[in-house]
Image (tube, rainbow, N blue to C red):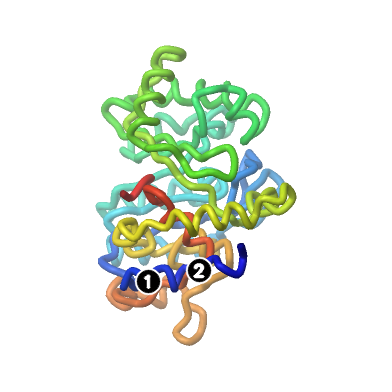
């Protein structure tokens, strides 16, 4: 099977496509690897014992770039991004620059004493919450994300609902498959989520994103341990959908790491696929205009974003 699997670039060429940057909309900031959870599917390999986080000098330089270039969207991720000393600085700097801000929230962080302030704070600054909830069934969530995660997630969602999330403010939930398979149809699953979460827990939310598991880090290790690595990569490659390519997030996103280094996307970041010209680039070395129309670095993992209905930080693409 390995010999017949096409490369991602050959799949693009077969459809007379090439992957280049378009108009810039989103700065995605990965503030570091520290998290209060250690999920099985995490492509960042974040965990409570990780200590790598963005420092003050880098954070200030990123803030200056935001103020100067005014991205339409600032997407803050991690780890648990709220554990960064500069989370509130990024939220407030981005909002002052006119950006729509996204917090990639794991929900259970809201249940910690140190971050109980989050629902009111996020609502006050009109931050969109994109929250992980891989199922509406307790046993499935806890199997992927740890014991009692589902119970704490439901409690956090109720607190977000209480301050207007899911009604006045955008609350998006994220579904990941539990194993080596493609997500089901996003619209149909969203309907199921809304019905089940309302009926069981009285919870409302705005929309559901389905995201294909990336064959990176912990999930890649699990695939290899279970002897499913080749079968999963074949599934992704065989499911390549050319219609997803125009909407890929790498075409409109600048992804940066905790040192300010520049990547095409958060997945390339975890694989160390840095942008260079010819030396490695940092955010303060580039402008949105300087990156426009540049070729995007690709690898076999890119099949995950183009398989079936497609997958991105904003859910399905086709």
Residue 9 image position (x, y, % from top left): 44, 72
Residue at coordinates 45% horizontally, 45% vertically from top-left? 211
Q: Which residue extends farthest right? A: 225
Q: Which residue is mark 1?
A: 14
Residue 108 image position (x, y, % from top left): 56, 31
Residue at coordinates 43% horizontally, 67% vertically from top-left? 264
The reply to whether callout 2 and callout 1 are in contact (CB within 8 Å) is yes
Vertical comparison of 145 with 301: above or below: above
The N terminus lies in quadrant = bottom right
Q: Please tell me the numbered disc located at residue 24.
A: none
Residue at coordinates 60% horizontally, 45% vertically from top-left? 41
- Whichever of callouts 2 and 1 sits on the residue coming sooner in the sequence is 2
Residue 87 image position (x, y, % from top left): 47, 48
Report crowding for label 2: few under 14, some 14 to 19, many 20 or more residues within 10 A (C-alpha).
Answer: some
Vertical comparison of 182 with 243: above or below: above
Residue 57 can be seen in this image: no
Q: CA distance from mark 2 to mark 1?
A: 10 Å
Residue 28 can be seen in this image: yes
Vertical comparison of 233 with 121: above or below: below
Residue 292 position by quadrant: bottom left
Vertical comparison of 304 with 82: above or below: below
Residue 85 image position (x, y, % from top left): 54, 49
Q: Please tell me the numbered disc located at residue 6.
A: 2
Residue at coordinates 64% horizontally, 24% vertically from top-left? 148
Position of residue 167 in the picture relative to residue 150 (left or right): left
Q: For the residue labelled by badge 2, is the local secondary structure a helix, a strand or a loop? A: loop
């Amino acid at each position: 099977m390995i010999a017949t699997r096409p490369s991602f670039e050959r799949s693009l060429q077969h459809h007379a496509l090439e992957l280049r940057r378009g108009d810039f909309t989103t700065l995605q900031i990965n503030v570091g690897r520290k998290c209060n959870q250690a999920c099985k599917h995490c492509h960042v390999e974040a965990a409570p014992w990780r200590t790598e986080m963005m420092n003050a000098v880098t954070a200030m330089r990123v803030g200056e770039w935001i103020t100067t270039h005014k991205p339409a969207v600032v997407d803050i991720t991690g780890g648990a991004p709220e554990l960064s000393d500069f989370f509130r600085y990024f939220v407030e700097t981005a909002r002052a620059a006119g950006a729509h801000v996204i917090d990639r929230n794991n929900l259970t962080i809201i249940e910690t004493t140190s971050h109980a302030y989050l629902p009111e704070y996020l609502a006050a600054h009109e931050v969109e919450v994109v929250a992980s909830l891989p199922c509406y069934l307790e046993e499935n969530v806890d199997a992927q994300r740890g014991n009692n995660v589902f119970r704490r997630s439901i409690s956090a969602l109720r607190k977000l609902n209480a301050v207007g999330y899911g009604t006045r403010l955008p609350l998006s939930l994220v579904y990941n498959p539990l194993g080596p398979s493609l997500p089901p149809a996003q619209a149909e699953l969203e309907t199921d989520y809304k019905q089940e979460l309302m009926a069981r827990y009285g919870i409302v939310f705005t929309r559901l994103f389905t995201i294909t598991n990336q064959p990176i880090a912990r999930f890649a290790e699990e695939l290899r341990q279970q002897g499913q690595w080749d079968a999963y990569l074949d599934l992704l490659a065989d499911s390549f959908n050319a219609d997803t390519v125009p909407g890929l997030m790498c075409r409109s996103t600048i992804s940066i790491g905790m040192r300010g280094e520049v990547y095409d996307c958060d997945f390339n970041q975890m694989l160390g696929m840095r942008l260079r010209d010819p030396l490695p680039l940092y955010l303060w070395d580039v402008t949105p205009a300087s990156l426009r129309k540049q070729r995007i670095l690709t690898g076999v993992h890119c099949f995950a974003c183009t398989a079936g209905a497609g997958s991105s930080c904003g859910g399905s693409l086709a």
